[in-house]
Amino acid sequence: MDVYEKYKLQRVINASGKMTILGVSKVSDKVSEAQKTGGQNFFVMKDLLKETGAYLAHRLGAEDAVIVSSASAGIAQSVAAVIGKGDAYHLMHPYDSRYQCKEIIIPKGHNVNYGTSVELMIQQGGGKVVEAGYANECTPEHIAMNITENTAAIFYVKSHHTVQKSMLTVEEAVMVAKEHSVPLIIDVAAEEDLTKYYELGCDLVIYSGAKAIEGPSSGLVLGKEELVSWVRMQSSGLGRSMKIGKENILGFVEAVDQYLDSGSESKESMLARLNPFIDALNLIPGIKAQCVQDGAGREIYRASVKVDSKLMNAHELIDRLKDGNTAVYTREYQANNGIIEFDIRSVNEDEMSVIVDKLKNVLGG
């Protein structure tokens, strides 16, 4: 009896991308072996955190780094860090009213829901959210005009979830932060470049370990040595409720090593796998497929499928694809426009054939 039979679970084809609701990504055999090593041995945990962080900082060219349980934990712990600034009392009382310098300025169009809200994670770290600009526009001036003596940090989100147009760039956010001597925290959870944002001048950079890096459930905060040391302190405070285990620490480090050595799938490889899939989709009556690039500009290419509304509503098609013994999960962000997308990064050739067959059955082709 396999795990699907034992727990009465559907098999899943993940054509939605590296999404938390589906367990994010697959890990390699080497990562699994590193997790096994961690799980079957003991370590002084504070030393393990410090030394693995130092190792990753060296590999990534940063002053320091710390592994956390997730990118969301990285947000909360980073916010608590810049508010408490290493203060021992704050570590145990992060919401005490005596800490007034707790405002976190974020572009309004970056305060999004990614499965939970960015705002909630900032508040969990003890921050008070101050939205700058408008939902469809935020300039460097909008950020600057909100900086006061109570500003603890500027927070920037680099993600396809955020508003893309008329937003200040990362470089402009760095400029404002430096001009006003305010730390800049950037959430780049799903980004593939592990050095770019630190090199641009961001003070704390937060990655998901399970997305582009394809590690186990984990996160990484890298940046300036003093600020990272404050984040690491949170393991004995706010971060205690979101601690990461030894097996995932070692698994994550192995995943980073593999990622730096081998990289992610190239554009050419992705398109070579994607184009025959799109050709097969275009043979199915009622849909029209084309290749599109990720909305945030990453080198990720997907099949965008326009559904003939006379035949079936896109939301209904999405639900039908999830029915049966094998569920096919797609990207649903444009379903209101009759469009669904297929992300093939975690989909093999056999699974693509299953998707095509299931669409044929659902649409009567």
Image (cartoon, grey):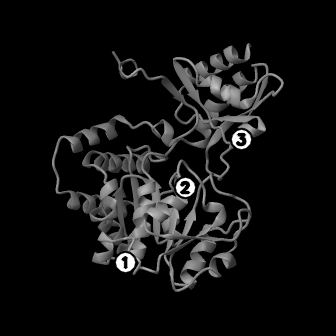
Q: Which mark is residue 218?
A: none
Q: Amino acid at mark 3?
A: Gln
- Camera-near label (3 vs 2) is 2
* Residue that mark 3 sits on: 334
Quarter of the image for residue 220 reads bottom left
Image vertical order of residue 175 relative to residue 206, above or below: below
**In which quadrant is the N terminus drawn?**
top left
Q: Amino acid at mark 2?
A: Ser
Q: Is residue 58 visible?
A: no
Q: Which residue is at the front of the view, 279 or 289?
A: 289
Residue 202 locus on image (x, y percent): 50, 70
Residue at x 28% of width, y 41% of height: 35
Question: What is the C-alpha distance between the residues marked 1 and 2?
Answer: 24 Å
Cβ–Cβ under 8 Å for marks 3 and 1: no
Residue 333 locus on image (x, y percent): 67, 42
* Residue that mark 1 sits on: 85
Question: What is the C-alpha distance between the residues marked 3 and 1?
Answer: 42 Å
**In which quadrant is the C terminus drawn?**
top right
* Residue that mark 2 sits on: 117
Image vertical order of residue 344 relative to residue 365, above or below: below
Mark 2 closeness class: few <14, some 14–19, many ≥20 residues within 10 Å: few
